[in-house]
Image (cartoon, rainbow, N blue to C red):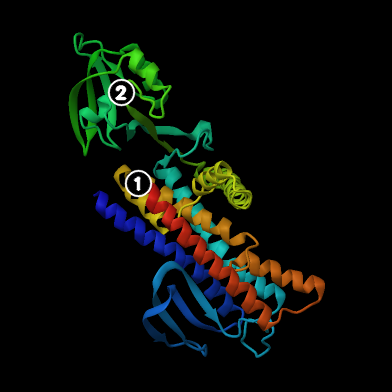
């Protein structure tokens, strides 16, 4: 089931690229701008087919390409200086704005639809105080899961694994004194109260309930470890909580509220990443190794590339279809946010430069556009490559 959900998640992620480009494609054709190619991923080209036009419209080329970093719609006459009828350059400023903003709009719409479906089916709680309408919210699942397992810890000795669901524990010498594990933040206090004792731990893995006997670390060992670079816990895990919240009539409201909340958090994360990049540059220029390392940590912790997205989808596949859909919805929202930013190679940057040229009454030349957009695109590719290297080191 997890493998099937992973495949579905990857397909849905690729669908986000198609949805984004479809927005550009449909709005361009509706406003008289010809589309010459609709491409999945970036060249070099693997396969292509000529699609015939209907109702007097010209056809276009549909292609599948090798680099899985996005997609594109190649419009006729994409430079601002093009004047031939049917070209992007000849379109009005308002039409150009609609075409460039259409991809953002489609990703935002996809995210809102997915959030609304999840609110009805059961929405995972990803952040503290996640938006919901309390009077119309029912918690349908609340599990304490194993996150990281510390090497050499009691948890490692009994073979606990990430995503195992913790049910309860009890002293081995008094098995009737069972303590249910219903909240992740209560686990440290529960294990501390049984420090040094042998316990019976019940957990679920792949739908099967298991019981293991293990001796927790004592308070002296835990206290001593806190003064080292490898602090230990009594059981030796980092617990996480997996909660599903379901709504009915308020599902559309929840969708908008969660989208707004995650947008704010995403922008804060981007600011942290940008600040981290600035620290890396400053640290390199001043040869301040500590500042450079801190900047690298801050920047890399806020972003992920194709490898990171695959790992998140892979890990999320074991948590069920709701979590998988939630990740896809968050990615769709993130694509909308990123593309609205004034970065030249992205939609927001093209809109910004278009309006800036109109304000300054200085048309964009073909040479300038090639230099700005081409340079920005190369920079983004290099950034994606760097993020991929960081992701490989982080996850593997």
Query: Does residue 76 show up?
Result: yes
- In this picture, residue 71 sits left or right of residue 170: right
234 and 288: which one is in front?
288
Residue that mark 1 sits on: 316
344 and 164: which one is in front?
344
Residue that mark 2 sits on: 235
Task: Give whichever of discs 2 and 1 has the lower sequence position.
Answer: 2
Q: Residue furthest front?
A: 287
Note whether 168 is above or below 7 in the view shown: above
Query: Does residue 324 show up?
Result: no
The residue under the point 65% across, 77% down is 369
Q: Residues within 10 Å of mark 1 (few under 14, many from 20)?
A: many
Image quadrant assignment for residue 232: top left
Q: CA distance from mark 2 to mark 1?
A: 24 Å
Image quadrant assignment for residue 193: top left
Task: Give the number of the mark in front: 2 or 1.
Answer: 2
Give the percent coordinates (x, y) of residue 395.
36, 48
Give the percent coordinates (x, y) of residue 260.
59, 46
- As helix, strand or loop, the secondary structure at mark 1 comes to helix
- In this picture, residue 108 sits left or right of residue 224: right
Give the percent coordinates (x, y) of residue 324.
37, 49
Q: Residues within 10 Å of mark 2 (few under 14, many from 20)?
A: many
Give the percent coordinates (x, y) of residue 93.
71, 75
Instruction: Tally the numbered discs.
Output: 2
* Labelled disc at residue 352: none
28 and 251: which one is in front?
28
The residue under the point 53% across, 63% down is 106
Note whether 319 is above or below 58 in the view shown: above
User: Mark 2–mark 1 contact, CB under 8 Å?
Assistant: no
- As helix, strand or loop, the secondary structure at mark 2 comes to loop
The residue under the point 42% across, 56% down is 389
């Amino acid at each position: 089931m997890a493998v099937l959900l992973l495949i579905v998640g990857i397909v849905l992620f690729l669908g986000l690229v198609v949805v984004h480009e479809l927005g550009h494609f449909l709005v361009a054709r509706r406003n008289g701008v010809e589309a010459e190619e609709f491409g999945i991923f970036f060249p070099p080209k693997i396969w292509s087919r000529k699609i015939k036009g209907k109702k007097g419209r010209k056809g276009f080329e549909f292609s599948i390409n090798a680099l899985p970093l996005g997609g594109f719609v190649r419009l006729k006459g994409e430079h601002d200086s093009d004047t031939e009828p049917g070209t992007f350059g000849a379109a009005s400023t308002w039409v150009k704005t609609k075409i460039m903003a259409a991809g953002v709009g489609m990703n935002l719409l996809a995210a809102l639809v997915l959030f609304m479906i999840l609110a009805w089916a059961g929405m995972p709680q990803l952040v503290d105080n996640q938006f919901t309408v309390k009077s119309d919210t029912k918690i349908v699942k609340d599990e304490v899961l194993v996150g990281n397992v510390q090497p050499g810890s009691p948890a490692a000795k009994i073979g606990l694994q990430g995503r195992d669901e913790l049910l309860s524990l009890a002293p081995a010498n008094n098995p009737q004194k069972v303590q249910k594990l219903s909240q992740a933040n209560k686990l440290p206090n529960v294990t501390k109260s049984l420090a040094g004792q042998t316990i019976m731990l019940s957990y679920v893995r792949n739908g099967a309930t298991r019981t293991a006997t293990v001796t927790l670390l004592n308070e002296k060992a835990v206290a001593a470890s806190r003064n080292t670079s490898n602090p230990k816990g009594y059981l030796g895990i980092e617990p996480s909580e997996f909660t599903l919240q379901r709504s009915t009539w308020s599902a559309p409201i929840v969708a908008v509220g969660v989208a707004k909340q995650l947008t704010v958090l995403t922008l804060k994360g981007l600011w942290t990443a940008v600040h981290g990049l600035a620290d890396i540059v400053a640290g390199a220029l001043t040869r301040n190794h500590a500042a450079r390392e801190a900047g690298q940590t801050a920047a890399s912790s806020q972003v992920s590339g194709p490898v990171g997205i695959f790992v998140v989808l892979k890990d999320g596949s074991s948590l069920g279809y709701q979590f998988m859909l939630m990740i896809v919805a968050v990615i769709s929202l993130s694509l909308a946010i990123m593309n609205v930013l004034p970065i030249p190679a992205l939609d927001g940057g093209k809109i910004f430069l278009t309006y800036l040229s109109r304000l300054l009454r200085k048309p964009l030349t073909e040479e300038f556009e090639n230099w700005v957009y081409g340079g920005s695109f190369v920079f983004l590719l290099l950034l994606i490559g760097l993020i991929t290297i960081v992701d490989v080191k982080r996850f593997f």
